[in-house]
Image (cartoon, rainbow, N blue to C red):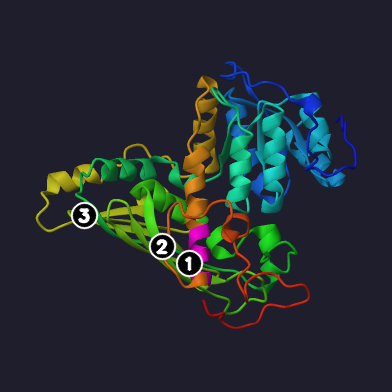
């Protein structure tokens, strides 16, 4: 297997001489794809989805990049990928992929995404998108204009038949106005999980469970209910010796008037992911853990709703589970026609903005409104906002106690 690689970092940025203009729609041939980072998410989610689509003639994985030469060579050997690199810049120059999928820690996402965009490649980047709104805006500024390239982010829970069906019912007000909602990501992570050096630190992970775990359910909630207006939040550091929080709660008011509660935790032995929306004529509830199918959704009609109407609401059609595969199919379809994909641009930014506002509210004891965090706001460039007891301090270990908001 050829290995045209060097020992420089996988996140190496490109110089101006490597830029190329976007080519609008991607030609109707297999999308030439490169994978950046060869850890668990690449092996367990990205490569299987790309392999399935390759069998259907949609994709062709031409290269992978990792700073660990042995790891990338093993990944390529297992996946039948022809070229292994340890230098992302060199890979982009030599392979000129149409699509780059980024599976590295969040602190590398901005640099690597911008590098790929500047080389003319579309990007599909793992969550969290980037550590801050400032980073996100820098990524968006590097995108193409008409026809791409664009950067999309992995929010697979909003894809699949169940989410599409419920989103349509809510958009059409089929069950009446949405009134009350609950968004819950209560998971369990032990000390061994946080022994990985980049976890639990603002600079490398971006945030705690609100950013690294609950972002999927919050993104799905926003996709279902639309824009939020204001948030009021609390956060605590109750168990883990980390810089970030390990639990947060929030109250969110939406533009349509609905009120929602949000809970994000890594302290919960009985793990569950849940979204519930109470509308005027029915309650919609999704209960799962790391992914959902049609059977994980439940619709309970109000007593006066005719049975035949309720059965129509409960007809989810062909079961397409939420997955990386479902999102990737839609992304490639967007590439074919040169259209901005879902979960990119303003659509990809909205969950990061809510999470940023959640942290600001929790750490300042104030209500935060959508749109108020921009350049000049300390939370625009760091989710801890420099808040006392939350901002990183060299040599200071996090206390095993709740930190007052």
Q: Is residue 394 magenta?
A: no
- Identify the mark nearer the N-term, 2 or 3: 2
Give the x, y percent position of residue 246. Answer: 57, 71
Mark 2 vs mark 3: give the one in front.
Answer: 2
- Distance, label 3 to label 1, CA atoms, is 32 Å
Residue 127 seen from this side: no
For disc 2, the marked residue is 231
The quarter holding residue 190 reads: bottom right
Q: Which residues are magenta?
A: 356-363
The single residue placed furthest to the top in the displayed view is 28
For disc 3, the marked residue is 282
Give the x, y percent position of residue 378. Answer: 60, 60
The quarter holding residue 101 reads: top right
- Distance, label 2 to label 1, CA atoms, is 7 Å
Whether residues under marks 2 and 1 lie with C-beta atoms below 8 angstroms apart, the answer is yes
For disc 1, the marked residue is 361
Residue count near mark 1 (Cα–Cα under 10 Å), binned few <14, some 14–19, many ≥20: many
């Amino acid at each position: 297997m050829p290995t045209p690689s060097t020992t420089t970092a996988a996140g190496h940025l490109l110089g101006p001489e490597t830029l190329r203009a976007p080519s609008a729609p991607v030609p109707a041939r297999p999308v030439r794809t490169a994978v950046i980072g060869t850890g668990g998410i690449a092996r367990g989610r990205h490569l299987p989805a790309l392999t399935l689509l390759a069998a259907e003639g949609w994709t062709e994985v031409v290269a992978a990049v990792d700073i660990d030469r042995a790891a990338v060579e093993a990944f390529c050997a297992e996946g039948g990928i022809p070229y292994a690199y340890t230098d992302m810049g060199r890979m982009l120059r030599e392979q000129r992929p149409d699509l780059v999928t980024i599976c590295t820690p969040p602190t590398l996402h901005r640099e690597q995404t911008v590098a790929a965009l500047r080389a003319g490649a579309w990007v599909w980047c793992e969550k969290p998108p980037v550590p801050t709104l400032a980073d996100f805006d820098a990524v968006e500024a590097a995108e193409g204009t008409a026809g791409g390239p664009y950067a999309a982010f992995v929010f697979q829970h909003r894809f699949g038949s169940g989410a599409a069906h419920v989103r349509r019912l809510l958009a059409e007000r089929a069950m009446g106005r949405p009134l009350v909602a609950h968004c819950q990501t209560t998971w369990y992570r032990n000390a061994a999980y946080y022994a990985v050096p980049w976890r639990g630190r603002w600079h490398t992970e971006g945030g705690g469970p609100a950013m690294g775990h609950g972002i999927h359910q919050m993104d799905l909630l926003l996709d279902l209910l639309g824009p939020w207006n204001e948030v009021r939040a609390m956060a605590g550091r109750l168990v883990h010796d980390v810089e970030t929080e390990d639990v947060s709660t929030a109250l969110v008011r939406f533009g349509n008037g609905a009120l929602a509660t949000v809970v994000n935790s890594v302290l919960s032995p009985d793990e569950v992911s849940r979204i519930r929306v109470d509308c005027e004529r029915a309650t919609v509830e999704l209960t799962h853990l790391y992914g959902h199918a049609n059977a994980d959704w439940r619709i309970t009609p109000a007593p006066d709703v005719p049975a035949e109407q309720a059965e129509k609401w409960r007809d989810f059609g062909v079961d397409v589970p939420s997955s990386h595969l479902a999102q990737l199919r839609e992304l490639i379809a967007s590439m074919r026609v040169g259209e901005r994909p879902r979960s990119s641009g303003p659509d990809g930014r909205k969950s990061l903005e809510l999470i940023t506002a959640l942290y600001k509210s929790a750490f300042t004891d104030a209500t935060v409104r959508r749109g108020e965090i921009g350049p000049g706001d300390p939370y625009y460039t760091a989710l801890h906002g420099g808040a006392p007891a939350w901002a990183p301090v060299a040599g200071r270990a996090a206390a095993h106690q709740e930190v007052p908001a």
